[in-house]
Amino acid sequence: MSRPASSVLLLLCLCFSASCYLDAQLQRTNPYDDKYQGPATCKADEDCAPYATCLGTVCSSSKLNQKPECSAKPNEPCVISGIYNRDIRLTADTTWLLRGNVIFGDDQTPVTLRIDPGTKILADPSTRATLHIARNARILAEGTREKPIFFSSASPSPRAGDWGGLLLNGNAPQNHCTASTSPCQNYASHGGRFGGDKPEDNSGILRYVRIEYAGATPTTNAALSLRSVGSQTTIEFVRLHASSADGLSITGGNAQLKRILITNAAQNGLAWTDGWRGKAQFLLIYQNVPSTNALEGRNGPLPKENAPLPRAQPTLANVSLHTLPTLGNIGITLREGTGAILYHFLVSGFKQACLSIPDLETYQNAWENGKLTNRLILSHSIFSCSALFAPSPPNAPFSLQDFFGSLNPSNSSVGLILPSATALQQLDFRPPKESPARKGPFAQIDDTFFTKTDYLGAMGPDDFWTQEWATAPLPK
């Protein structure tokens, strides 16, 4: 039975292996009360997101400052639900169950969610659970190659879209302002506030983390959503598998990523928008299901908002985009005026096109005074698709054939052979000795973030970085 926040005595327990204790706390004030802007009644947590949860049929922000609820029964999971405004640690000796819309932080308090190596966090499909990390809060999820951290569905027969996913909100710049906020901020009805003026903002660490069977709700629309995440956030060795929406969604910010594996996303493998100006290296997207694009970049959030600033212009190097030739989707789509600096790409198997630039604004951003502006570059890459290029819009200042050929250096269209069935099962995309991916020439990238390589694509001959952690079974 729900009671007002000012009179609730929270009796909740936190389990550590064989021990469990009660934590009683009288909740008198609630910093969420002046932030909740949603409806009064509800059927599910997502109706009340982001600053309240559904208690019965009423949106309430009273579930604050709690600890996970643990049963005294052995082998029962500890339930994580509602809103947390204190530091929490999740350990590997307990199974954790996300239930409903789970929020860490109040947009101001620097609280930390710490997750130990080997920890398993399952999500309740009946509540379409989602985990939010608010601005100024941090997640420290540091797994290891031997002990990755798992986020997955609690269903015994998991499917894409069983739960929402993981969402990080930060204070880095983005270009889609809600009302007249300064610095520019956005408020998503299902995702909380994000945006600010701190390009080096730090939302924590994701390392050796797997996120599977997510993408269910408007809260995230991806297995992993990064909204205005800053460059000091560490994101590496992450696998995103079987999302019913995008695998990775990046909205604004300056997030930097390395060694990211995205498999079987039903929409886009990676999608960016709203002014992302970060970096990524060693990105591997393998689509073995019908999908939209392996990679889609946009600048504005809507078709008519093509030129808000800062303009999206990430730098990506050593990227592999692969699919089966029968699926008929697109490798790279650049739209709505985005910029991008792309090096060392391998793109193969896409039936509709390896590359599509469907609207004029993107061409205009890339072209000025009869030459490329260096705001859109694709060089030192190989395409191998049934159709290399999608049609260009009328009045485009250059063709995609020229963009890939004479206007950018060291691109080629030659045959690329996918790894064997056994290698695919192991996610082993290391190029054989005779592969054109190892023959060069190679770009010289003047940026200390990027590791110098003598190969194209996400995986080198001696760098089997998906080994073990990316294919390990979910712990029992």
Image: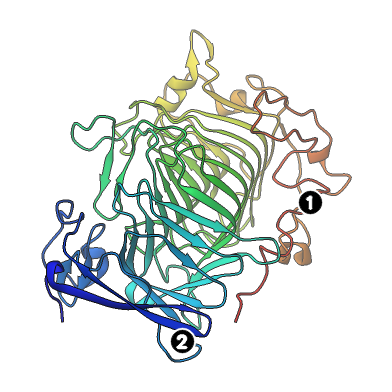
Colouring convention used in this rendered image of the protein? rainbow
Q: Residue at x 72, y 24 (%)?
A: 444
**The residue tagged with tag 2: helix, strand or loop?**
loop
When the figure is inspected, residue 189 is found, relative to residue 406, above or below; the finding is: below
Q: Residue at x 24, y 52 (%)?
A: 189
Residue nearer the viewer, 130 or 420: 130
Q: Amino acid at mark 1?
A: Arg
Q: Amino acid at mark 2?
A: Glu
Q: Residue at x 26, y 35 (%)?
A: 177
| Figure quadrant of residue 142 | bottom right
Question: How far is mark 2 from mark 1, CA to CA?
Answer: 41 Å
Q: Earlier in the sequence, mark 2 or mark 1?
A: 2
In this view, the mark in front (2 or 1):
2
Residue bearing mark 1:
430
When the figure is inspected, residue 268 is found, relative to residue 155, above or below; the finding is: above
Residue 262 in view (yes/no):
no
When the figure is inspected, residue 171 is found, relative to residue 313, above or below; the finding is: below
Q: Residue furthest bottom?
A: 73
Task: Name the side, left or right, on which 173 lies relative to 445.
Answer: left
Q: Residues within 10 Å of mark 1 (few under 14, many from 20)?
A: many
> What percent of the width, then of the height, locates residue 47?
21, 64
Q: Quadrant of the C terminus?
A: bottom right
Residue nearer the viewer, 294 or 194: 194
Residue 76 tag number: 2
Residue 76 in view (yes/no):
yes
> What percent of the width, then of the height, locates residue 256?
55, 39
Q: Quadrant of the N terminus?
A: bottom left
> What percent of the width, then of the height, locates residue 379?
66, 28
> What percent of the width, then of the height, locates residue 427?
71, 60
